[in-house]
Image (cartoon, rainbow, N blue to C red):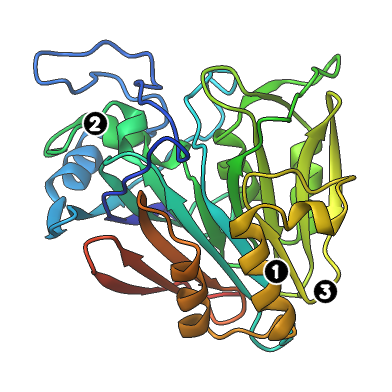
Amino acid sequence: MRRHALVLGLAVLLTATGCSGAEPVTGAPVGPTGATATPVASRQTPAEAERTLASLRRVDDLPLYEMTYVGEYDAHPGLDRPTPSPVGCSLFAALGDPARPLFARNFDWDPNPAMVLRTDPPDGYASISVVDISYLGVGADPTGDRRLLDAPLLPFDGMNERGLAVGLAADDNARAEPVPGLPKVGSVRILRLVLDEAATVDEAVKVFGRYNLDFEGGPPLHYLLADATGASAVVEFVDGRMRVQPGDGKWQALTNVPVIDVPEQRRRADHRYRVLAEALTAADGRLAAPAALDLLDDVRQGHTRWSVTYGLRDGAVRVVTAAGGRHEYRLPTA
C-alpha cells in the first residue's frame, strides 16, 4: 500500500512556560525563499512532492492550514539531530469508562504556524499528530516551502490507529544519561517512532527503551502515554535513567512537575495538576470529549493556543484553537 498523509495545519502559540525556539531540523541548504532544497524525510517522487505542496490551503485565521501529504517518508534519518523542545502544556488520560477512554492536552507556546498531520505509512500504523512547523524553519506563509515534506518527523502529540496516544511536556528535573550501545534520538522525534511502531503502552515503553533520548537544544521532557485498553504511563528520566510510572486505570495527569517518586500531595502543589487531579478524581476518570475540553479550558494559560482530545477507541480528534476555531477529525481505529 502506498503511504499518503492528510495534513491539516493549525497555528499554535506557546510562551515562557510553553515550548521553545525554532530551528530548521533538516540541516539542508536554505534557498532564497527559505525553502530547503533537500528534505530529509521525504521518499516521494518529484511529482508526489509537487502534489503535496500544491494541496496546501489556509482554512483558519489562526492561521490553520490543510495539506495532503502524498507518497512516502522515512522517520529514521538524522535520529540524533537535536531539536528545540516544547516546555509547558497540561495533559491527562481519562480512562474510567472502558468504552470511551480519552487522551487530552493543552499546548502552550509561541505564535507559530503548525499542522495537524495524518499519516498512513505502509510499514507502520496510521496516525493523526500535531506538528509545529516553525521547528522545520517554516514561517507564517508556508506556501511552496519544501521543508513541509519533513513534517512527519516532529509530532508534539498524537494518536495512531490502534488507539495509542502520546504527548510531551517540560520537566526541568529530567536528565537522560546515555546507555552504551543504544542509538541517540531527538526528544520530539521519539514520538514519531512510537506512533508508527507501537500499538499499546507496553510497546511504546519498549520503543523508548531502544534509544538514548537527546534533550540538547531544548528543555528536558517527560511523556504521557495511553491506549485503547485503558492502560497509561508516564515516562520520565530520573537521576539519568528512564523510569516508568503506570497509571491506576482511572486517570493519569501530567503538567511540568515530576511524577515518579513524588507524593501526590506534592504534585498537587502545582495549580494545573491540582485542578486536573481534583476534577478527574471527582469524575472517577470518566470524561467525554466536551467535558474534557472544558477541563482543559480550566487549566489554560494566557499562551495556550490549542487544546485537543483523542478518542482512543472511536478515533475522534477534536481541536479547539485560541482563535475560537473548533475542528473535528476522524482516524479509523483498529
Q: Which image quadrant is residue 79 in?
A: top right
Which residue is tagged 1? 277
**Residue type, numbered disc 2:** Val
Sequence-first disc among 3 and 1:
3
Work out whether mark 1 precedes mark 2 in sequence or the reverse, and give the earlier one.
Answer: 2
Mark-to-mark CA distance, 3 and 2: 40 Å
Provide residue 177's location: percent of width, then percent of height. Answer: 80, 18
Circle 2 crowding by C-alpha within 10 Å: few under 14, some 14–19, many from 20: many
Viewer-side label of 1, 2: 1
Q: Which residue is mark 3?
A: 249
Q: What SS does tag 2 mark?
A: loop
Closest to the camera, between mark 3 and mark 1, is 1
Q: Mark 3 belongs to which amino acid?
A: Gly
Which label was assigned to residue 138? 2
Is 318 displayed left or right of 295 in the figure? left
> Identity of the amino acid at label 1?
Ala
